[in-house]
């Protein structure tokens, strides 16, 4: 019997499988598609996702396949540069083809021992006190202790659970694809600049291999949202928006997306959980979707592993929804705002102009960039210093880098005093005594996802927080 079955091998499913395997959990990933997605839609990895890749030793491999770009212009495509001195070593956007990042994460999970089966569609799931029975389209049944639905916005797992997915259906639609153009580049640039004065969602720019990436809103009727778009659809919409179709031809891939915005009523029903697009969908404004799913997976992975391994505190698994659902709510709200700011009506254009002025204030710009890149997240861990509940940037230590010490997915005590110990939690939590660490507090406790769970200097307080996040010690404590 598997300990966890994951439905869906997209970014969230593959990342979750790897996180579970770091802790030795027996994982099976079921993917209904027989082959990986072939179209080359480019995803943008934001600061927080890059930090998580660094924590798991994946960053160098990912950087080899991506292209670094400035962070400016992320929020509603407002052309403002990113603020200086952001609190990270990775202050850039990494453009990377989505099939490539999925492949890298899948290879990472498989290299750690996850089993991945393609052409296996989940059609049923029943749970009892001991586990979940998963039924496949071919009639086969599998058994696991937990099931996680990472199977996208049309999630079968979510439907089987009867979990509501309220929100707004798509009101607008956009075509996206890569193709060649039949007019000189100078003419393209002039026309695109003219169109973007009013249509902020429009884009036509050189990509690679002599092709252009085209993003064009649908402004005329007649589109069938159930079908993939054709090249003629692109020509029609380009003429409607730009007055010319730019002579587009020879497409590499074509797709469409809407602005539907939905959030699952809950992320957990007993032994079944949701992550990624199965839990939330929203417009691609700001490029947050893939990042949100990967970050869900890292938050959930160590907690579910702790539950499987038997050392999780009673409420640990519940903190997954308590922490991640509010984050998704904020992402849905900021994408709603961005969609409005990019619309062509006089009201939205006036608000956009005002926000453009406000972003000249560093505090406003920094706040919005922190939202989109997820470095502004602060989980509610109670009263304490400002860094409590926040992620900690990578630090230089006496021997190496902080994130390198998080590769095993364990907790970490970073102690500047040299007086603390991980005690009875040494099987789950590492200890680094380093008086040179650039901390504003004597010591901290980091969770496996890099968020600060405690800051202080007293061993008794540290022990209390170790128990809160990492369960009972393996041996009784000698209270000081």
Image (cartoon, rainbow, N blue to C red):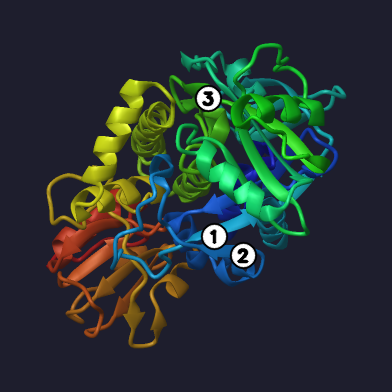
Q: Is the N terminus in the top left, top right, bottom left or bottom right quadrant?
A: top right
Residue 85 drawn at (x, y percent): 28, 68
Residue 448 drawn above or below residue 115: below
| Element type where label 1 sits in the image | strand
- Which residue position holds label 2? 62
Look at the numbered discs 2 and 1 and tell me whether their residues touch, using CB distance below 8 Å: yes
Work out whether mark 2 precedes mark 3 in sequence or the reverse, and give the earlier one. Answer: 2
**Rendering quarter of residue 122:** top right
Q: Which residue is drawn at 24% across and 63% down?
A: 477
Q: Is residue 405 left or right of residue 314?
A: right
Mark 2 to mark 3 CA distance (whole Å): 29 Å
Label at residue 259: 3
* Circle 2 Cα neighbour tier, 10 Å, few/some/many (<14 / 14–19 / ≥20): many
Q: Where is residue 12 in the image (x, y as percent from the top left)?
A: 58, 43
Disc 2 to disc 3: CB gap under 8 Å: no
Split into 4 quadrants, where in the image is the C terminus? bottom left
Q: Mark 1 points at which residue?
A: 94
Q: Quadrant of residue 174?
A: top right
């Amino acid at each position: 019997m598997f300990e966890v079955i994951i439905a869906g091998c997209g970014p969230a499913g593959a990342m979750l499988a790897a996180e579970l395997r770091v802790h030795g959990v027996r994982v099976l990933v079921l993917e209904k598609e027989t082959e990986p997605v072939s179209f080359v839609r480019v995803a943008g990895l934001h600061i927080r996702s890059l930090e998580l890749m660094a924590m798991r030793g994946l960053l160098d491999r990912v950087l080899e396949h991506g292209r670094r770009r400035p962070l400016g212009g992320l929020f509603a495509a407002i052309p403002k540069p990113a603020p200086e001195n952001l609190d990270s070593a990775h202050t850039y956007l990494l453009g990377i083809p989505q099939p490539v990042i999925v492949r890298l994460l899948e290879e990472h999970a498989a290299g750690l021992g996850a089993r991945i089966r393609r052409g296996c569609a989940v059609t049923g799931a029943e749970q009892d006190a001991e586990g979940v029975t998963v039924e496949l389209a071919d009639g086969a049944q599998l058994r696991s202790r937990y099931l996680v639905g990472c199977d996208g916005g049309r999630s079968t797992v979510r439907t089987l659970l009867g979990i509501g997915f309220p929100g707004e259906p798509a009101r607008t639609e956009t075509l996206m694809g890569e193709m060649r153009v039949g007019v000189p580049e100078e003419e393209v640039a002039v026309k695109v600049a003219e169109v973007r004065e009013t249509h902020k969602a429009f884009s036509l720019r050189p990509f690679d291999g002599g092709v252009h990436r085209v993003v064009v809103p649908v402004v005329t009727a007649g589109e069938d949202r159930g079908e993939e778009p054709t090249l003629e659809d692109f020509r029609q919409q380009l003429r409607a928006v730009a007055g010319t179709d730019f002579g587009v031809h020879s497409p590499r891939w074509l797709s469409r997306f809407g602005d539907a915005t939905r959030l699952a009523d809950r992320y957990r029903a007993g032994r079944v959980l949701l992550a990624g697009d199965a839990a939330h969908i929203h417009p691609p404004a700001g490029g947050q979707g893939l990042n949100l799913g990967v970050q869900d997976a890292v938050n959930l992975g160590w907690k579910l592993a702790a539950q499987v391994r038997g050392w999780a505190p009673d409420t640990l698994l519940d903190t997954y929804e308590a922490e991640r659902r509010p984050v998704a709510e904020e992402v849905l709200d900021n994408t709603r705002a961005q969609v409005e700011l990019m619309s062509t009506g006089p009201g939205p254009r006036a608000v956009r102009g005002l926000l453009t002025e406000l972003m000249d204030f560093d505090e406003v710009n920094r706040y919005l960039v922190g939202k989109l890149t997820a470095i502004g997240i602060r989980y509610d861990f109670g009263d304490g210093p400002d860094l409590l509940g926040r992620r900690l940037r990578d630090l230089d230590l006496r021997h190496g880098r902080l994130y390198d010490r998080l590769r095993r997915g364990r907790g970490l005590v970073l102690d500047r005093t040299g007086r603390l110990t991980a005690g009875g939690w040494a099987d789950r939590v590492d200890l680094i005594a380093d008086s040179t660490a650039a901390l504003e507090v004597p010591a901290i406790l980091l969770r496996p996802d890099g968020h600060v769970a405690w800051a202080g200097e007293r061993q008794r307080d540290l022990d209390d927080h170790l128990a809160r996040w990492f369960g009972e010690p393996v041996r009784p404590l000698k209270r000081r």
